[in-house]
Image: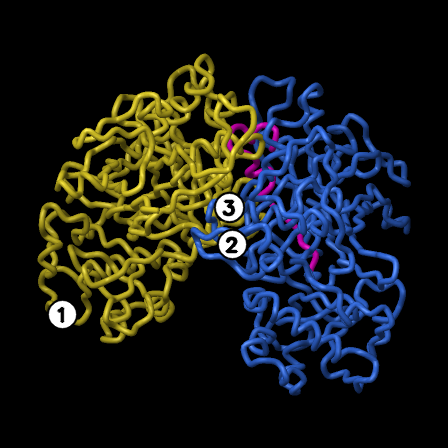
Chain colours: A blue, B yellow
Amino acid sequence: MTCAIDFTHDPNLRSWVHSANQADTDFPIQNLPFGIFQAQNRSETPHIGVAIGDQILDLMACQKLGRLEELPEALQAACCASTLNSLMAMGKPASLRLRHHLSQLLRVGQAPDSRILVSMSDAQLLLPATIGDYTDFYASIFHATNVGKLFRPDNPLLPNYKYVPIAYHGRASSIVPTGTSIKRPHGQQKPANRSTPTFAPTQMLDYELEVGCFVGKGNDLGDTISIDQAEDHLFGLCLVNDWSARDIQAWEYQPLGPFLSKSFATTLSPWVVTMEALAPFRGTAFTRSVDDPPILPYLMSSSNQSTGGISIKLEVMLSSAKMRQENIAPLRLSQSNFQHMYWTVAQMLTHHASNGCNLRPGDLFSSGTISGNETGTQGCLLELTQRGTQPITLPTGEVRSFLVEGDEVTLQGYCEEKGYVKIGMGQCQGRIAQT
Amino acid sequence: MTCAIDFTHDPNLRSWVHSANQADTDFPIQNLPFGIFQAQNRSETPHIGVAIGDQILDLMACQKLGRLEELPEALQAACCASTLNSLMAMGKPASLRLRHHLSQLLRVGQAPDSRILVSMSDAQLLLPATIGDYTDFYASIFHATNVGKLFRPDNPLLPNYKYVPIAYHGRASSIVPTGTSIKRPHGQQKPANRSTPTFAPTQMLDYELEVGCFVGKGNDLGDTISIDQAEDHLFGLCLVNDWSARDIQAWEYQPLGPFLSKSFATTLSPWVVTMEALAPFRGTAFTRSVDDPPILPYLMSSSNQSTGGISIKLEVMLSSAKMRQENIAPLRLSQSNFQHMYWTVAQMLTHHASNGCNLRPGDLFSSGTISGNETGTQGCLLELTQRGTQPITLPTGEVRSFLVEGDEVTLQGYCEEKGYVKIGMGQCQGRIAQT
């Protein structure tokens, strides 16, 4: 069951936080995404905030001032935690109740109260949750096809692709919040013209445009989650940049999959946009061709087929050190949409738990690189430059096959739908460290 | 630098805990492995114990009774924690100091004190640490060759094997302590005689004999750990059964590696045998053939080549429900030795961090299935039964290609070396749940 559209999505709602009413904000009162922030110049430990315009609603401050007292005590306690895990664990009724409360607290008509706000410019944004396990899917058929073509031109998709939501376990320890600089990793690589590998800095440093999903309510080990129950376990989405070293990946990945080519860093956007906020932007799942095999029953539900898709417009921006020096705006490398996924978020979750694997509140699974099927929609440089053979020219005249020191990659996403206020995902940004 | 052999290994040392002096115990005073236990009939939360004979030395009780007061306060606090993570984080000097203290506390000559002991039969043994990330290597060349032969008879080893310590990220959430029953997972599988997959209970449920290593001191993201520093980051070893569903694995693993075929359960033995305890059992690393390529410099050190190996004798025992009913002793399926690994534990750790991936105290990495190169040394049924084509006959006349309901698999390991007291790893046991 997907979340219903209710009064919190009313396009006429406005907030007493004026910046939340501006047309270009990611965070109008209809959004209300959750994150963890640390206010500068304050001794408080990191805690939960809600993005509203260019401000953060400080939930601990709200609680101290009695602004949450209509909520159940356990929910108030979860609002004062140092991560979102407890709130995520409480499941849908709690998320929805809190959303309704926050929508009322922030709307025009309530007395403005600067004591419960922190300016985003005065805060550091941290990881939203303690991520127990991180899983990365491969759910964009266009990405899988584009990458497959580079290696197997006649047979790009493997036989399992249209049956199995392919995924691999990722590394949780190296997940970092937006703004963390990324160190070019060393690793083994074997160029085609050499007979033996070398250990050296990667020469094929890439980004991957992805959307991640935080697990809300968990399941016990040995229990499964049916496709019709899956939405009850989805807390919300963020943007994910799964940085990749393509030369290391090519050499190491057989037979057990990518390892060190991925585990050096994964960047998250700081705000978790809840499934409740995304309700107006739901749509049909991927439209399969008549030649595609039927979806196996454990992944099939008519409601998931009709509303399992989520339309999120995505883009990747690149700025080089030289571009910033010359005040040239970032270059948009690609535009895509999350609705292009062959598998829905619900199908990914149901598949993940189909063997009884326990998903815990705060666990993260990500979509894999999101690419469309047209030029300019590819979600990574491996595809955009055809493995480096067709470099991109930047406005400065610099060329890029892969990333170089000083390059800054920014992922952005937003949802818009006629009759509803546009909401944004915030930014997922990382810069390749100068060595 | 490997741990030195010191007075704690003296073969003449005896404990006032009489059961620790018996020849067949895994836990003489020379061992002193750490674990987490919950005493039955007590309201205490789980905390740290040290196995000694058939007893557990209760470190919290020791602290309360002032028996740790010679130790630094931070170390005393770590001894009273609910997991081993804090103790692991403190690094080698702390581990060694604690070991020396415990050796003195438990030896003959000290006044016996039943208040600091809990009988193992009155305790439940839990996971030793909060495992942030779990990584599984593929470090047995005989296993890689045996499995490769099943799929590629003429070319069993892939070109990267002798250069790269191959590994994949595993699932941390489904790691369970010894004694947890294992539910047969469902999953997609495509038998060779069918054109499309089905979703059904696995028909090829297997165990994997492995040795796991807990990370002690961690490294920061972006930092590496040189091969000469690696030993400083190793806390200790345990036995690991990485249960596997071979039919699910065969269908899902291309191109990103094993996922649901592994993530339904991984069983650990409860006692972490420290690197200090293992000091007398160190030996040379794997002897490579003259045709093998040289080890790349970042994984090469003369001290690791001369002492990086660890001789641990390993065995896998199987009992079926019928065997237990008829009081037939478990059947030994295989015998192997941890020294058969192509890569040492230090090389696995150094490789893991070579891209700057941060390893945290309590993270676990495991060896992958350990097989020798002779009949009877294969560490899983996939190899032993040649993918089910050569079933094993049990003493009851039952046959096994793969595991069935009621089967109980027990991994055991011990170290023995002339002039030293034999020490054991304890048991890693799991039974396939009746449905």
User: Are the two marked residues, 3 and 1, in contact with CB atoms closer than 8 angstroms?
Assistant: no
Picture quarter with the N terminus of chain A: bottom right
Q: Secondary structure at mark 1?
A: loop
Check residue B18 for magenta coloring: no
Q: Position of residue B400 (x, y in %)?
A: 28, 30
Q: Which of the chains bears the disc numbered 1?
A: B
Tell me how many marks there are: 3
Q: Which residue is mark 1?
A: B113
The circle on residue A359 is 2
Disc 3 crowd rating (10 Å Cα; few below 14, some 14-19, many 20+) is: many
Rendered residue at 19%/51% (across/down): B27
Q: Closest to the observer: B287 or B214?
A: B214
Magenta-drawn stretch, dominant element (helix, strand or loop): loop
Q: Closest to the observer: B16 or A82?
A: A82
Q: Position of residue B336 (x, y in %)?
A: 27, 31
Q: Amino acid at mark 2?
A: Leu
Q: Amino acid at mark 1?
A: Asp
Residue B395: quarter of image: top left
Magenta region, residue range: A249-271
Q: Tell me the mark number nearer the camera, choosing from 3 and 1.
A: 3
Rendered residue at 65%/49% (across/down): A345
Q: Secondary structure at mark 3?
A: loop
Q: Which residue is mark 3?
A: A354
Picture quarter with the C terminus of chain A: top right
Label 2 and label 1: CA atoms lie apart by 44 Å
In the rendered view, tell whether residue B332 sits above or below residue A305: above
Q: State whether residue B314 appears in this view.
A: no
